[in-house]
Image (cartoon, helix red, strand yellow):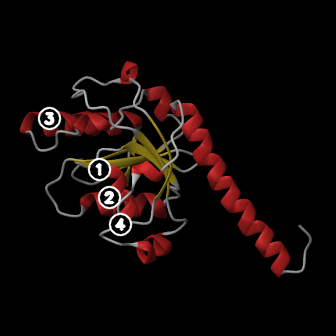
């Protein structure tokens, strides 16, 4: 993977989505967000040497714009592993099956919200899939240990929030609770006070 400029990243992502749409290879091409140049500012963006796959990671570890137009098997798994190695800790996706791919690698679905049609991208097929917020394992090693190719997310067991912002806030709170629990356990184990 190579660092990419905002311009190169957006160009590769748009080309990938266009190819997926025109070749009919992936009917879910519209699910990958293309952000504005301003939104990509401050993110770390990476592309494969062939420019057919890439990922962006925000300063706080949010994985976004994860895409692949490659016919190489396992490319998405490699991208996700790379993103975690580079500090990716969380993501959100449409509940049309991607949540299950991420779950195989130990990602936990912690919140969901109905899709808001006002944000429907060009090419939207009209399906009312939820948006699912997920938390990833803290390291590649933990991700590999958690791997289970049969793991699926039961969306009936994932708490629903009324809108995207409250879903994201709930996900981020769940991450902070885990950090606070670990910190408290360490303090106790080391003889400190809570």
Do the residues bearing badges 1 and 2 touch, measured as CB atoms within 8 Å? yes
Residue for badge 1:
97
Which secondary structure lies at badge 2?
helix
How far is mark 4 from mark 1, CA to CA? 12 Å
Indicate left or right for 119 with 20 as reference. right
Residue, x 73% and y 65% (percent of image)? 181
* Whether residue 45 is visible: no
Residue for badge 4:
151
Which secondary structure lies at badge 4?
loop
Residue for badge 3:
21
> Horizontal and vertical percent for residue 136?
49, 59
Q: Quadrant of residue 32?
A: top left
Do the residues bearing badges 3 and 2 touch, measured as CB atoms within 8 Å? no
Q: Quadrant of residue 144?
A: bottom left
Q: Earlier in the sequence, mark 4 or mark 2?
A: 2
> Horizontal and vertical percent for residue 18?
17, 33
Q: Residues within 10 Å of mark 3 (few under 14, many from 20)?
A: some
Do the residues bearing badges 4 and 2 touch, measured as CB atoms within 8 Å? no
Residue for badge 2:
101
Indicate left or right for 104 with 173 as reference. left
Q: Earlier in the sequence, mark 4 or mark 1?
A: 1
């Amino acid at each position: 993977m190579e660092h990419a400029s905002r311009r190169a990243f957006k160009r590769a992502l748009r080309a990938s989505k266009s190819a997926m749409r025109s070749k009919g290879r992936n009917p879910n091409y519209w699910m990958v967000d293309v952000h504005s140049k301003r939104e990509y500012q401050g993110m770390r963006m990476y592309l494969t040497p062939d420019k057919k796959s890439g990922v962006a990671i925000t300063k706080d570890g949010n994985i976004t714009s994860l895409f692949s137009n490659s016919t190489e098997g396992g490319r998405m798994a490699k991208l996700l592993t790379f993103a975690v190695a580079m500090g990716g800790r969380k993501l959100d996706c449409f509940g049309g099956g991607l949540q299950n791919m991420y779950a195989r690698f130990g990602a936990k679905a912690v919140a969901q919200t109905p899709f808001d049609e006002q944000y429907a991208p060009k090419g939207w097929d009209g399906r009312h899939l939820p948006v699912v917020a997920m938390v990833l394992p803290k390291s590649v090693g933990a991700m590999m240990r958690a791997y289970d190719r049969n793991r699926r997310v039961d969306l009936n067991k994932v708490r629903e929030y009324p809108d995207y912002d409250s879903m994201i806030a709930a996900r981020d709170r769940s991450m902070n609770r885990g950090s606070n629990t670990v910190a408290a356990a360490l303090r106790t184990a080391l003889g400190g006070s809570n």
